[in-house]
Image (cartoon, helix red, strand yellow):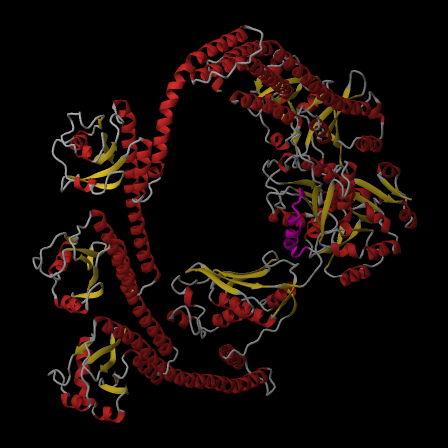
Amino acid sequence: MKSHTFASVLVLLAIGMALMERTPAAAQARPARVAILTPAQSLSAVHEGLKEGLARLGYKDGKNITYIVEDTNGSSSNLAYRMPKLLAANPDVLVAVTTVHALTAKRATSTVPIVFAWVADPVPAGLIAGYSDAKSNLTGVAAIGDSLMGKRLEVLLQIVPKAKRLLALVATTEGVAVSAIRSLETTAKKFGVKVVRRDVTTEDEVKNALRETDKGSVDAIFHVPSTLVRARMDLLVKKAMEERMPLAVHEDTLLDWGALVSYGPNPRLIGMQAAAIVDKILRGARPGQIPIETPDGFFLGINLKVAKRIGLKIPGEILERADRLVE
Amino acid sequence: MSFLRSKSIKGRILKQLLLAIGVVAAIFISVWRASVEPALRADVGRRQKEIAQRAADQINEFIESRVQELGAVAEIGRFWEMRAEDQKEALYRVMKRDPQVREIAVTDATGQEVLRLSRIRVFTQADLISHAQEKKFHQAMKGQVYIGPVSHGSTAEPFITLAVPIRFTAAEIRGVIIAEVSLKTLWESVSDIKVGRAGRLFVVDQNGTLIAHPDYSKVLLGLDLSHIDEVEEMSRFGGDDPNVGAVQLGMDGEPVLTNHAVIPETRWGAIVEEPVETALADVKQVERLALVVFVLTLGGALAFGIIFSLRIARPVRQLEQGAKLIAQGNLEQKLDIRTGDEIETLAHEFNTMAEALKESREGLEDKIAERTRDLSALYAAMAPLASASARDLLQQVVERLKKATHADAAAIRIHDQETKSFFSAAHIGFPSGFIETTRTVQEGSAIVRAFATGEPIIIADIAEDPRMTVRKQLEVGFKSCAYLPLKVSGQFRGIIHLASRESGCFNDDKTEHLTAVARQMGVAMENHELFEQSQQRAREEAALSSIAMAAGQSLELDKLFGVTLDKIVEVTWRERVNIRLKDRLTGEVKLVAYQGFSEHEIEELRCMTPHPPTERVFYTGEPVVFNNVAEGRVPGLLHRTRSVAWIPIKVESKVVGALGVSDNQSRPFSPNEVRLLEAIGSILGVATENARLFGETIRNLERIRALREIDMAITSTLNLKSVIRVLLEKMDLFLPNAVVTVKLINPSTGELEPVACRNIDEQTWMEQRKNLTSLSRIALDRKLPVTLADIQTDPRCAEREFAREQRLVSYLGVPLVAKSQSLGVIGFFTRQKHSFDDEEIEFLHTLAGQSAVAIQNAQLYEQTKQQAVELEKANKAKDEFLSVTSHELRTPLNVVLGYSQMLKEGMFGEIVPEQEKALETIMARSRDQLTMINSVLRVTQIEAGAVTVDREQTQLTEFLDEIRSGYGIPLEKEVAIEWQYASDLPMIEIDRDKLKHVLENLINNAIKFTERGKVLISALHMPELGVLKFTVTDTGVGISKEKIPFIFEMFHQIDSSVTRKYEGMGIGLYIAKKFTELLGGSIEVESEPGRGSRFTVTVPVLETDRKSEHEGAAG
């Protein structure tokens, strides 16, 4: 009888091995979980771009991907309290929009992969130690912030070469504006242009600064990025229209508000770029293996309607170079 | 696997089968290893080559297309014919068409840039540089295309530099176009190329440096891979790989299958590698499948082998079974095997043999049957005996014996050693009186011989047989007889006597039969004895268990002793039993229980003290047994006692009593009986000890409970009188009706004074107090309890007369001692003679100790209460004084200041400069004085708890600006004041006045104690921690480490010498600290003498929501 048992065991073993060979090891995959920490408001385009990018890569919301979005609605205070909710969802990837949000995310976890987007320069910001950190749990898309101020000025001057005095409203309480104006002033010096700087800290001060700028005292308005001034973009547009002078801005969405020229990265496309990185991580790559990217492109936009209203003729070569024309 | 060792037919067949399978498997594996696997590896190598080549082509095409694009711009003659603006636009077009081109520059024939465009940076004429010394310029000027190495800029993005010549004519080159091209998208698509399950594709440059890899961090490290096998092969053989399918070490040092392709434009190599494990996963899969097939085949073959061997082995086994049956005598069984072969023939032979054996056996059986019948009758006769029934059944057996042996009379005669006679246990058929008359037999008679030799003696004819020396049986008509020795438990115990009235009824032919009869009888009697013994054991066990149960169920000794005595009498059949126990304290042995004695005997027993046999038991710890006592020969025994045993009652090895068992007859105590009594003795010992321990535990519990009650009662109050009252009340529980007195030492006089008493008229006691102090003094001096058995006569008692009057006899004095301090004495007087035992003294001593602590606490509480009242009065007076004084001082000072100001402003007429200077001094000093008075007032408020916190919305930056503005005036010494705080500090809710006071105080102190250098004030908002941190750092005199812990105390300055140099009352930091604490914060200081100090104030903030500063460019 023992021999019978032995033979039966052998046969069962063989069948078992054959079956194991046929059974795939991977179980049914659960939907990927992507947590997003974003200030939204004007930067909603970034995470919308992210979702669009992921949709193009085959991720269907609610089917094979779930988004957990923490919208801080423009606030940068008490961000750390937002993190437990996001991390409790046990996300596969955490996407953080802007430097402040990315820093908060970094402090909250060293294990969950973090993809940042719309961050000026991650090394000085303290997000990463260097670009070749294989152990880091962070990667993402770095927008090039201050350097573009000069390029934007160059474009403006190509459109209105006679412009010699530019009005710049600087929200001194915002670090972004302070470093941007520094960059602008450096380039302006190169081109021999005077920046008429007006420091503002409240919306009233924005109004006053515009009111107190006499007609003809400046040749163009150069928008220095800040939350405060952007909130009253309508006043800048109004002033530019009234005095028939150009308004240069940093993102093409503002063209629709009445700005003349824009040059810079596109938030939606930055989001799509981040989507490609998220996809790599969802497919098993570690953040340290993925290089930090710069924007794939910078976009030159011209509002021809505005040009017409202020009686400006846009040079042909600029029109040829433009990526977007509002007609 | 037992079949492998088996020599059976089945085992042999299976072994052969396994061997055959093994050989086939070995051949299969050899062929597999030698030809199939290498072919599969080579196939993997070819697949890898295709992948590598595809990547190489992709890279080549990318670079080629960029070179062509630049070449198109620099088309012969055309570029230099354009206007500068058109040149620029042409280059902008290139950048617009191809997002990978990040920067383009154009140089003239000297290498000087004439134009440079970037997507990010701005280049003016001043920014243009010369490339005259660079390789890219020289190579392009020679008419060749330059493709630079891969590099990374400030970001991680990879790019290469391309340079193409700009020809003016076919022979003349007038400049160079240099372009920076991003490889990001190229590397992304190369990294996406899949190589098997776990393989990878990476790119190295001509030096073997890694330039593209799916794990980009490796590229950024600039790994040198020139040492790995595949890169070496690439540099030696170019695009050919001589070792396709060979296992090599990969870039991470693990064994891989690898291949490569070379990119012609750049001489870079695209290398594909895959770990051997996964690359050959398919091969392994096939191998595993082969193994599965092999195992299945093996299993099938084994199953076949087993079935085949079973078909062979089964008829053989049937033959074997048949042979066994024949050997056992079963000749009826026929073998039915129809295999049609040699085995069937063999089975037929077996059947024939069995038939022959059956015939020869049948003759023998008839003879055996007759004997068997006799034996069966005999065994039937013995059946009742075998069941070990009672003794009277012997009679029935004798009857059956007579019938079974066809005798006319039968008897069982037991040998009596003492009388050397054979008495009858049972008999039948003998005339009455015959057995008794033949009880005593002569030496040498047949019955004696049979008994002595143990051999049966069969007498066929009593009249003739010479062995019969006595022939009394003839007289009663018996002609033949048999004497069969009866052996019980290995000893001959008697004889079975059979007699017949026919001669020759018993003869030698029946010897065996009769011997069997005797043996059977022996067994029956043995069983009977064993039965009797087991009955006795059971009774003993039952008795022991009843006694043990009684001992376990109750701690009442009387009940236990009653049960024990009953059971001893029941089991031993002894007449008298008694128990004596030794008193633990006196050592006296007392009779505690007895049974079977008359009253008179009990009296006699009680008088027998000491009792010599019992003393011996106590001394030796062993039983003392007398089995046969002549009257009066052993002292301590009743005169009628003939056998007696005294058994020790022991607890472990200690004898605590004795158990006496006696009888009027001389009935020896068997060892078993003594052992039983010893076991009972042990149970009684344990039970006695348990009862004693239980009694002791109960007594202790009662004491502890009482002690606790007293403890709770006297510690629940701090009132001295209540403590003593409770003490006396509870004491009554212990020594009912005893006179208890408490005397305490008066701390001021040191005299013992009576405080309270009980059970004696208080007035009488008070009047006589001095007299009885002599006793208290003894206890007080010794600090130990003191007892006097009779104070009416004891010379140590000076108040014997009083004692006699009050009928006080025995005395116990216990000192009240707490923390080594004698507080007084508690005295206990009994009205009858009482010997205070150790337990009582110890208990009352403990009680006194606890009472002493309570008394001391009560005394201390009284003192503290008194002091607190005085202290409160003093404090109130101080506060009132300070408040009134401060107000009174401030009023005239304000007047002084006001008039000085008016004088200075010339309201009372012109004043000369000296007068003005004097007025300024008056005003400055007055202001200082006012500040001081205000500080004192503030301290008074803080101390009185009258300071509240009023929070309000505060823009922190503005708040700091406001403080800063107060320090705008240059100082008279070389001290710079620096401020560090962000311009975007948040809006918070805080008590601005207090925070301002704290900060100004710290800043003023810093300025005051710094002669040269600077004072730095900084503010930092830490939203993650929810705090604001202010620091005031100076380069002043500093504070020594020893002083730091005290600087925040009131009226403290660094030291007296400094106090002289730096004015102040030393309450500024005290107020600062108190205010900071009111704000929920803390203040810390670090300092080094001679180098300066740093004060850090940390306060929590309630930040009011504000908008963040992200937006626009990256936040």
**Residue B353 place in picture, x, y as percent:** 46, 9
Residue B785's image quarter?
Answer: bottom left
Compared to residue A318, the image places residue B262 above or below, namely above
Q: Residue at x 56, y 86 (%)?
A: B899
- Res. A208 in view: yes
Image side of residue B186 versus residue B436, left or right: right
- Vertical placement of B206 versus B405: above or below? above
Residue at 12%, 58% (x, y): give it: B613
Q: Where residue B1100 appears, x then y in whole percent? A: 58, 63
Horizontal and vertical percent position of residue B707: 33, 73
* Relative image position of residue B351 (x, y in whole percent): 50, 11
Q: Is residue B842 magenta?
A: no
Q: How many marks?
A: 0
From the viewer's perspective, is B336 left or right of A265? left
**Could you say which is closer to the camera, residue B694 or residue A296?**
B694
Q: Residue at the spot x=50%, y=69% of the render?
A: B1073
* Front-lying residue, B288 or B1022: B288
- Rendered position, A261 above or below B900: above
The reply to whether residue B211 is in sight is no
Between A166 and B863, the one nearer to me in the picture:
B863
Q: Magenta region: which residues?
A: A76-93
In the picture, measured across the screen, residue B355 lies left or right of residue B307, that is: left
Image position of B1065 (left or right of B654): right
